[in-house]
Image (cartoon, helix red, strand yellow):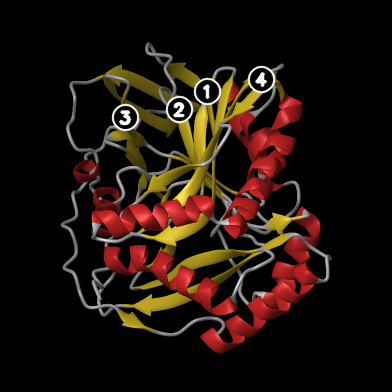
Amino acid sequence: MNRAVLTSRTERIDDPGELLPLLPISEGCAWLREGEGAVAWGEAARFEVGPGEDRFERAAAWLDDLFAAADVDDPLAAPGSGPVAFGAFSFDPHSSASVLVVPEVAVWRRDGSAWITRSGMGAVPSREVEVIPVSPTEKIRYAGSSIDEVAWLEAVDAAIGEIRADRIDKVVLARDLKVWSKVPLDQRALTSRLNERFPECYTFAVDGFLGATPELLLGRRGARVTSLVLAGTAPRSDDPGEDRLIGERLLASSKDAGEHRLSVESVRSLLGPFCEKLEHDPEPWLLKLANVQHLATSVEGTLAGDVGTLEMIARLHPTAAVCGTPREEALELIRKLEGLDRGRYAGPVGWIDARGDGEFGIGLRCAEVSGSRARLFAGAGLVEGSVPEAELDETRLKLGAMRAALGDLS
């Protein structure tokens, strides 16, 4: 019996306008920034990656086999055209949350072009898709956290003690918030609200994991690679003068500058071996979002040879921005103190095509959604000079993005 192969057909289309309204189902995949990107639905192929330090390698091998045998008609040959896999990977290799999905239908708009790709195992899908109305909104209710605020403050204090004892330079501790509703949460509506409020971010939705991340772990187009590093956070103000002063204080903060420098050095040291040339901004700049502002640094490089995108992501993840430094010591301290399974929070999330082009962000400002329930996540980077109460306030600020997307405007 012949094994069915992936069949994929891409064709140009007229500009479809806003992409998110095209999703016919509550679930689906999305990757959007400043009006460009993709929405997708259905599953032509799916790979539950499973736990293990080699999860990126196994994911890459599955994709290589799938794409190498595929019957592809792609006249555009542009980043994102042809068959594409959307992926979300766990933060911790011990977790089993990683997944790759090749959708049946993907609609793209980028760089002045628009196209649709239809994919299926053995045949391109031709059936009509039933459009499911957007679910009515319902007040969300809070069901607590995996670790309460007092216990989290104690964990932060213990972590700061490790830093002061020079056993670690930085560690990131996260917390979650569980919510539920009387009706299923419509992921299209949540994704749309995030995309509208945070157009500068990468709004993503993959297998029930959705959010709006400002942090690009790795973008690749041919031999060019890019990473956007964020570390150091301050609130926004409705008053322009006060907002400017907050930003200036963030730029002048030695504590935040030190945290940011560790994150930039982490990315440079991990990405550098793949590149013949690697450059970064000489000084951090302010990335201002709707609810927070961050210290930001762009890192750009040219690859020295043939290297897989997921291979680079395996080397980069987890960065100091979401884990800490030294990496292994920080990860062990997270496992000891955090008191929760992060799942895909702070893990790589994005897309990759058959040429290896793609974009993966870090899963931040996000939620894991299942039916009428969701878990929201936020974290704070701890360095010398961190104050537990201030770090708790930072997580509350970050959780506000998903709470607002769920309709809680308090």
User: What residue did someone put label 3 on?
Assistant: 108
Q: Is residue 197 above or below residue 139?
A: above
How many numbered markers are drawn? 4
The amino acid sitting under disc 2 is Pro
User: What residue did someone put label 4 on?
Assistant: 303
In the picture, measured across the screen, residue 221 lies left or right of residue 27, that is right
Quadrant of the image occupied by residue 408: bottom left
Are circles 3 and 1 on residues that touch, CB within 8 Å? no
Q: Is residue 314 visible?
A: no
Separation of marks 3 and 1 at Cα, in angstroms: 20 Å
Q: Residues within 10 Å of mark 4 (few under 14, many from 20)?
A: many
User: What residue did someone put label 1 on?
Assistant: 70
Separation of marks 4 and 3 at Cα, in angstroms: 26 Å
| Mark with earlier residue (4, 3) | 3
The amino acid sitting under disc 4 is Leu
In the rendering, at what x and y percent does residue 172 appear? 63, 63
Disc number for residue 264: none
Where disc 2 sits, the SS reads loop
Q: Is residue 277 visible?
A: yes
Residue found 60% across the figure and 22% down from its top:
68
In the rendering, at what x and y percent does residue 220 appear? 54, 26
Select label 2 or label 4 by which is in front.
4
